[in-house]
């Protein structure tokens, strides 16, 4: 059943393929009431999204972010809601992350060339556009070249975390990402927690650092996974958040906005916790 709240969406400013305006139109047409735009390392979608949303007064757009962090042997994504996107420290850090991603993406393109799968760096930059460059842009270029049939195959064979063409981002701990979000008045939430190996070791530490929620209503998760994660969230006193993690990749089986998300009361609880909201 479609939901009213979707707290995980990407645009062309990072690795999504709808512009902020296109995304806002889509979520409004799909009947969503509260959404968060959570691009990787960038907040530039927010102002154009709010501009478009003036035509849809029933729709609220929460300013969000998604930050990639590292723990030994695993990766954790931290979402931030109601961040003060004008916060200077936040923007300086985001700029640094984005800048460092350029050299890292180039390294992956170089490795692909060495492996016998040359992709044109200029084409990858063109696909990425002005915003945050990421592996999905490289995956897209590989599909265009015919090396793989869908982006997922590029991850499975080449640029996944253990793949032969993978290159690491600059490292950041989840505690650092949580601090960055809190200092910008936002509410930190763990994204897609089932991908984290030792969740029960990690969660108490991150709760201590200020984590306020974790994704449970995540489109990719079946009911059994959601039930299990719901219990884990309750155990640590975390809000049960979620969303579609929509990128408009246009691949078979992709989850659409509004296919999953938390109840409205969770969105309200997040707003209550945000110190950026006056
Ligand atoms: P990056 O931020 O450059 O490390 O790229 C990570 C992004 O790639 C994630 O946020 C997802 O959107 C996408 N991604 C990660 N793993 C996969 C996968 N196995 N298949 C398709 N997309 C993936
Ligand atoms: Zn993404
Ligand atoms: Fe993520
Ligand atoms: Fe995401």
Image (cartoon, rainbow, N blue to C red):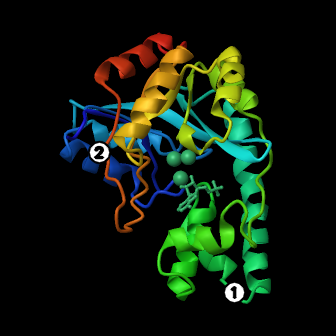
Report the residue marked by disc 1.
118
Task: Please determine whether, in this image, residue 85 is positioned above or below residue 170.
Answer: above
Give residue 83's quadrant in the image.
top right
Foreground residue among 15 and 157? 157
Element assignment for label 1: loop
Are circles 1 and 2 on residues that touch, CB within 8 Å?
no
Task: Please determine whether, in this image, residue 240 is positioned above or below residue 261.
Answer: above
Q: Position of residue 17 (x, y in %)?
A: 43, 61
**Which of pointers 1 and 2 lies earlier in the amino acid sequence?**
1
- The 10 Å Cα crowd at callout 2, few under 14, some 14 to 19, many 20 or more, is many
Task: Please determine whether, in this image, residue 228 is positioned above or below residue 42.
Answer: above
Element assignment for label 2: loop
| Residue 119 falls left or right of residue 189 | right
Q: Position of residue 108 (x, y in %)?
A: 74, 70
Foreground residue among 176 and 83? 176
Give residue 168's quadrant in the image.
bottom right
Report the residue marked by disc 2.
259
Question: Residue at horizontal 80%, vertical 85%?
Answer: 114
Q: Position of residue 257 (x, y in %)?
A: 32, 47
Question: Residue at horizontal 76%, vertical 85%?
Answer: 115
Task: Please determine whether, in this image, residue 274 is positioned above or below residue 154.
Answer: above
Q: Which mark is residue 93?
A: none
Query: Split into 4 quadrants, where in the image is the N terminus?
Result: top left
Whether the residue carrying mark 1 lies under 8 Å from ligand 1 is answered with no
- The 10 Å Cα crowd at callout 1, few under 14, some 14 to 19, many 20 or more, is some
């Amino acid at each position: 059943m479609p939901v009213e709240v979707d707290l995980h969406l990407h645009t062309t400013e990072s690795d999504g393929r709808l512009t902020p305006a296109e995304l806002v139109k889509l979520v409004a047409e799909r009947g969503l009431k509260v959404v968060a735009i959570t691009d990787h390392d960038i907040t530039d979608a927010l102002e154009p999204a709010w501009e478009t949303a003036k035509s849809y007064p029933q729709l609220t757009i929460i300013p969000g972010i998604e930050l990639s962090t590292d723990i030994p042997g695993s990766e954790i994504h931290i979402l931030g809601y109601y961040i003060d996107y004008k916060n200077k420290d936040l923007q300086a850090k985001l700029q640094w992350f984005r800048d460092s991603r350029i050299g890292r993406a180039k390294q992956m393109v170089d490795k692909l060339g060495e492996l016998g799968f040359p992709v044109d760096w200029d084409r990858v930059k063109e696909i990425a556009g002005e915003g945050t460059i990421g592996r999905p842009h490289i995956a897209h270029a590989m599909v265009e070249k015919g090396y793989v049939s869908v982006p997922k195959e590029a991850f499975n064979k080449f640029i996944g975390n253990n793949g032969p063409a993978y290159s690491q981002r600059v490292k950041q701990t989840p505690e650092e990402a949580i601090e960055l979000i809190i200092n910008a008045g936002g509410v930190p939430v763990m994204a897609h927690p089932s991908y984290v190996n030792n969740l029960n070791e990690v969660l108490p530490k991150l709760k201590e650092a200020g984590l306020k929620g974790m994704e449970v209503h995540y489109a990719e998760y079946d009911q059994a996974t959601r039930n299990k994660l719901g219990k884990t969230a309750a155990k640590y006193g975390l809000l049960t958040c979620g969303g579609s993690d929509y990128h408009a990749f246009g691949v078979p089986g992709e989850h659409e906005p509004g296919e999953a998300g938390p109840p409205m009361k969770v969105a309200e609880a997040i707003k209550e916790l945000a110190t950026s909201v006056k």
